Amino acid sequence: MENKNPISEELLADLRSKGVDIDRTLRILELINQHPQALSPTAMNHRLPSEGDSRITDRTELMGVAIAAPLAVAAFEKLNLSRAIGEFAEARGGTYYFSLRGLRTLGILLYPQVGYGVLNGGSATTYADEKKNRAIDEGAFEVLREDFFNIADRAKNLPKGITPAYVEKDGSPGPSFLLLKMRSLLIHALEYRLLTGDRETAVLPLFQMTSLATDGPLQEAYQRYRQDPLLAELIAHTHSDPTRVESAQQGLLAALSGSDQGWPRKIFDRAYGQKNRGLALPGGHGENFRVLEPVYRKLRGRGIRFVYVGNVDNSGFTVDPVEIALLALQGAEGAFNFSWRTPLDVKGGVLVETEEGRLSVADIGQAISAEEVAEQERRGGKVLFNCATGLFDLDYLVPHLDTIRDELPIRLSEQDKEAGRYAQAEQTTWEILSLMKHPLILAVAKEKRFIAAKMLMETLLAGPLGEKIEGSPKISGDLRKTAALLRRGMENLLETEFGFTAPDAQGRRRALGVEELTQALRGNLGRG
């Protein structure tokens, strides 16, 4: 590109050598300098939602839903199913009432119209960093110290998605986050085959956003996964193969000048004190609306109407047929999961209402301060923590992709590290809520939908090793309670979503084969 900006050729060459997307960096820099007031968390006046907000649906207690007949019929006709609406719902006056069973059956039938997208993080360096993991709880870290280093030493240089999603009782690593997600997709594909008898239609295609550093190792892992016993039999039986992934790589952004250097912001050019040396940083998962644009358009062209998008490190990010049906019937642009915050939830976003009355997600530390969240909570606000799981209607998303990339808020976080004082610009996927008129907000059980692992300690605490902290007087009761909740959730997911048996006397689990899974799924198809 022609260099019309006051950036030296030496700096440009340095950034290009590090894989920085120069054009995108300059566009973000332009947006930031045009709207500096939008970057101040204190200027946004976010409010936590109040109890009983009608825009929030409690998924944990949902038994069914009544939808106005004209809306239900119009929505159903768009789904192009060779079924009558009366097979799923009961006409009641001017509405159709969909029971939980009807919603679940409808959602399964829509699997050919649903894609599943994973936002891969970078390598597991921060995830396995000793200092950051200690910060969760010093006492818990000391109890799990040996187990921590056993896994950390293996994981540090790997993409996070192919590190263990849980650790066995004896300290050995379990399957990776991505291997479990692929197995879950295959079990749902089997569910569709059993319900319909259709053995050929493609269902639940997997797509992903990777980076320059992670794409190669991930592709190598998928080649191995294709032969893994957890997948191979299911792939052959269902004629589905989630290891063949639609993929797009996210480029890196340049670090920007810190607040101490005033406005306008510039590209940071003194990394490690060396002139014309920059830093290459990830641009945040909100970049998926730009990076995955060709994938979204391709999927819509293939007849995919809805797409899941979620973080790789959330084991609770799985397909929910009821959620699919709710989105398909209610005319929302997207559906998003939120759960009540726990002591482990210290990083990420919370559900807020903007000054304009729209719902959005405010990342703690970027768009809203931790102190403000605590103060509003003391005054009666309800903290619903973002589960990093969204289900989008591509009929909304695809036509808006060209504008979302610039309208999605850009957040700056100030950094003071060995490389110097600089700012990192990021876009958060879930702030797309503020651009939507009618998002569907689902309050879910954390232990079912949000078993996330920002840090390795969270993975350890959510597995059988977490039992080691029970009874320790040096560890807070809140942490012990949360860890026990997450363990129950992970145990439930392993048995219901990922197809494993309950642990034996030695704490080991066995993966169910196709015949056993078929028997279990047949027993569930008629239930709500």
Image: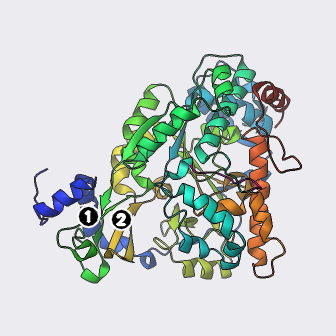
Q: Residues within 10 Å of mark 1 (few under 14, many from 20)?
A: some
Q: Residue at x 70, y 54 (%)?
A: 167
Q: Nearer the viewer, residue 304 or 202?
A: 202
**Left or right of 251: which side holds 182?**
right
Displayed quadrant of residue 458: bottom right
Residue 29 badge? 1
Q: Residues within 10 Å of mark 2 (few under 14, many from 20)?
A: many
Pointer 2: what residue?
Answer: 425
Q: Residue at x 79, y 67 (%)?
A: 468
Residue 492 badge? none
Q: Position of residue 272 (x, y in %)?
A: 27, 74
Q: Residue at x 11, y 60 (%)?
A: 9
The magenta stretch spans which residues?
163-170
Disc 2 marks a residue whose amino acid type is Ala
Mark 1 and mark 2 in contact? Answer it, CB < 8 Å: yes
Q: Position of residue 48 (x, y in %)?
A: 60, 71
Disc 1 marks a residue whose amino acid type is Leu
* Majority secondary structure in the magenta region: loop
Q: Was residue 49 drawn as part of the magenta stretch in this picture?
A: no
